[in-house]
Amino acid sequence: MTVGLVMIVKDEALILPRLAASVKDHIDYWTVVDTGSTDSTTQVAQDVFAPVPGQVLVHPFDGYGPSRSYALRQAESHRLDAGPRRRRHLPRGDRHRHHG
């Protein structure tokens, strides 16, 4: 099974490091669609999700539905290139424990 992360973001540079730390051992690829950030969101996303294969795309926000559809289409095409990778799986009881 291949697991991907797809996000629509705007000005999330401060949030992305913590989010990436909590998920990047459990995903095979990621797609971040930036809808017009004025901070360093796009660079931070590339940095914090490395070395997991992924992409940052800049696309204007045109409503939640259309933006979501765009993000999912782009992620699907990227997923086909990424393939599965070895992830660290947590035992059921440890899923909510922070690993730093």
Image (spheres, rainbow, N blue to C red):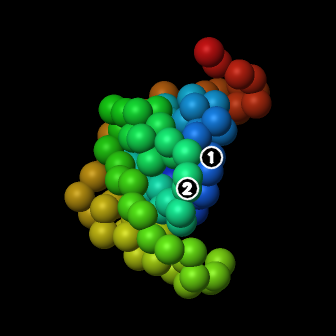
In x, y percent, where is residue 89? 54, 31
Q: Residue at x 64, y 18 (%)?
A: 99
Marks 1 and 2 sit apart, C-alpha to C-alpha, by 8 Å
Label 1: how many Cα within 10 Å (few below 14, some 14–19, many 20+): some
Instruction: Mark 1 vs mark 2: give the one in front.
Output: 2
In the image, what residue occupies the spot 70% across and 31% down? 95
- Going 55% across and 56% down the picture, which residue do you hit? 37
**Residue kind at label 1, given as amino acid type:** Glu
Q: Residue at x 65, y 78 (%)?
A: 64
Please state, as top left, top right, bottom left or bottom right, where the C terminus lies in the image. Answer: top right
Tell me where residue 8 sits by quadrant.
bottom right
Residue 91 in percent (x, y) is at 64, 27
- Residue 1, position as x, y percentages in the image: 42, 53
Choose the circle earlier in sequence order: 1 or 2.
Answer: 1
Label 1: which secondary element: loop
Q: Is residue 85 above or below residue 6?
A: above
> Badge 2 is on which residue?
37
Q: Can residue 47 be seen by looking at this rendering?
A: yes
Q: Is residue 30 left or right of residue 19?
A: left
User: Is 37 situated above or below 15?
Assistant: below
The single residue placed furthest to the top in the displayed view is 100
Q: Is residue 71 above or below residue 42?
A: below
Residue to which mark 1 is pinned? 12
Determine whether label 1 and label 2 are within 8 Å by CB.
yes
